[in-house]
Image (cartoon, rainbow, N blue to C red):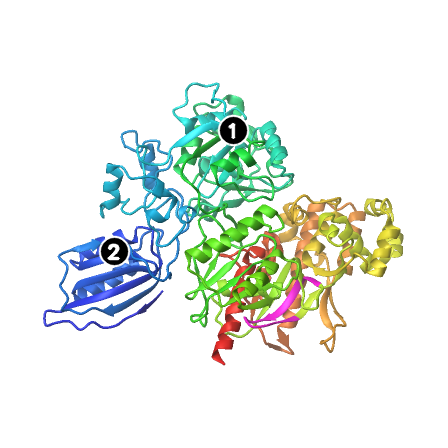
Amino acid sequence: MSTATKTVQGSDLGLGAEEIRVTGIVQGVGFRPNVWHLANQLQLKGDVYNDSQGVVINVWGNIEAIDRFIKKLKTDVPPLARIDKIKRSSLPLNRSIPAEFTISVSQNNAVQTNITPDAAVCPECMADTLDPFGRRYRYALTNCTHCGPRFSIVDAIPYDRNNTSMKAFELCQDCAKEYQTPTDRRFHAQPNACYFCGPKLTLARVDGNPVCLESLTQLDDVDGACTILQNGGILAVKGIGGFHLACDATNAVAVQRLRDSKQRYGKPFALMARDIDVIKRYAIITGQEEAVLRSAEAPVVILQKSRQATSGMKRQFGKVDGERENDLTDIVDSVAPRQNSLGFMLPYTPMHHLMLRRMNRPIIFTSGNQSDEPQVISNNEVITRLADIVDYVLWHDRDIVNRVDDSVIRIIHNEPRLLRRARGYTPAPLPLPVGFEQAPELLAMGAELKNTFCLIKDGNAILSQHIGDLENALTFEDYQRNLALYAQLYQHTPEQIVIDCHPEYLSSKLGKQLTEDKQIDCLEVQHHHAHIAACMAENNYPLAAPPVLGVVLDGLGFGLDSTFWGGEFLHCDYLSAQRLATFKPVAMLGGSMAMREPWRNTYAQLMAEMGWAELKMNFGSLELVEYFENKPLASFNAMLTKGSHAPMASSCGRLFDAVAAAMGICRDGVIYEGQAAIELEAIVDQDTLHNEDERLAYPFTILSISVPGFEHGLPYIEPVAMWRAILSDLNLKTPAPVMSARFHKGLAKIIVTMIQKLSTRGEQRIIDTVALSGGVFQNKTLLEQVITRLEHDNFKVLTHRQVPCNDGGIALGQAVIGAAHLLKKNRR
């Protein structure tokens, strides 16, 4: 936070008058009531109001008191607020001094403010909801200035009730009094409501027939939803940012029915549990993970599965009202097949808490959609898009304006790291590093998969919520709707649009169309340069700082030589990226089919390393070789020889696929992106990883390949020795978990060796900062191995925490690269 100060000239009585402008996350978070309290404590007069730039405070009083007021303003901040800047300027003392300090009506002018992310229900509101003597007893939509919906219900700035979907609900007398009373926790809480004046909750059947439940003990509709879950039903639940699909995670029939009807085959489901104690029956939770679960952001947190026996759970934990003895069972394996982790979240609205109070076991709580489609947000869509999936729906009549999926976090190397940035985090701005203060407005379109887009405005990057994969038509429509929404909310007029250099990305095609329509410049940015720039930006790496050595490991990105890259070592700053080294390029047998059938990558790798004759001679007895012999190898060999439908790619993601398939993991095909790599990591033997002799890690070497522009060749990671070690271990019938650990350790070692080679010249280190990015670094085992080894060698390591390392962070990188180019252009 920075503060610009201008001294106020007071009279002999020591009086002063100032206008104080505050920018940051200061609307919809109880900031004005907090200002009112502080001003009255210090006996200051004046007023405070919202405008489209933030919060404006006019104060009259003792100069020393005003200074104390400013100090308190910085330290006594409401829970959801964030001050980015305070600007002070003098007011004329000859103006009439107000009789008191008041909160005034919001004003409209140019947008420079930020919209607050949605927040989990606070303890005070939850206590109100559970108080049988309070007027909000069991009101499932209780909220205040410290919690509840924000971004998901706003359609314009400033954030006032008439600019949200709550404008349809007129406050009752009691709620209006709270809303207008500065000492009340609900003062200017825009979604404030109660039973009498607020949105109404209803439990209904999707077929329109009456709800008839077996038990007649339900307290209300939200409690009835619990009975449906306990009885094996599938329920649609309207949350803050969209509908979810829920069922009992211990009911095999319900889980399989949900998988079949949602058409989500194999990909793990997210889970919700009533409280931490329930989660602890099924997963190991560290203190850090528990803190993230309980946070106002309330994301899904990836936790290690517990090994505690189900029978032990039954003995340790007693029954809860409404549970039967045989209900205390384990989570069905198909919730997260072949995984050693589970994604859990805690209830984050009063409705969730009330629904799960009698539920002594976890529920699946996954996005309300067909697989790969955007999440349903309107009540009408439930009937048209979810009727074939759910039996019942628990909904209310408050509209969701903005779709916001659940965020996902994993603790890696003792840091919470966002794998998906959405509810609770967006659209909170990311302050840009030093040097970007005067960056012009621009729009970065993001990638094709896991898409987000990014605006630059007023020294901040505003990264959108997770949109999804644009190849889905409904998702692409949602992407375009969100682009228009953000432009309206932030009154954003870009000077430039930044796109990925892949010519077939839908985001790139749309970006080019927009630049033609708006008659503005378009900048194409290489995919992996954007990855590293995003990592630099979120670590506040200054614009003028020396270049870093960036390591990007992912699936595929369009390279500057028009081939596919995916395992790159780059010399990067915000303006340029030079390719210093790579992984060995290997053919993608069948093009995109290689991404869906991992065995193709295994075969292509082995043919590139040793050829069929050597493979057959030395390893002919392997089941893997027999598997290949049942394929039409003549056709595939012709493709490899001619390069037809077999583009070369230096992809680390495809290397993971190849190794997994060699071990029999996802060999024939994958159901979702990254499945083979995820399942390969899931089986890593920890004892082998941490205690086995380093020399047994699978070996790689570094060679050079002739490439134009590289006098001595482009260094690359050669995996032939690794493949011979893997095949030898397969011959010895070495357990797959041991092999997985050896592969991960060997890969980490060669990555660090390559970094050491590239960062030194003779005996002198010429680069000391390394940035790690790309979707492969979602792999906890690999990332921790690489970080630990680099830190041991005294490198400064930049990694992702606030922004996903996968393609969800690409837009931020594009944006800062575009901003750097515009700033350079404007300085000429």
Task: Identify the residue under disc 1.
Answer: 206
Q: Residue furthest left?
A: 12
Task: Identify the residue under disc 2.
Answer: 35
Amino acid type at circle 2 is Val
Looking at the picture, how far across and down is residue 100, in whole percent? 15, 55
Amino acid type at circle 1 is Val
Please check the rendered image and state whether residue 567 is part of the magenta-colored stretch, yes or no: yes
Looking at the picture, how far across and down is residue 423, in whole percent? 46, 48
Q: Name which quarter of the figure residue 715 lies in.
A: bottom right
Taking depth in this image into account, of 525 and 297 the one nearest to the observer is 525
Specify the label residue 155 is tagged with: none
**532 to 402, vertically: above or below:** below
Q: Residues within 10 Å of mark 1 (few under 14, many from 20)?
A: many
* Residue 745 seen anywhere in this rendered image of the structure: yes
Q: Which contiguous range is marked in magenta?
A: 564-579
Helix, strand or loop at mark 1: loop
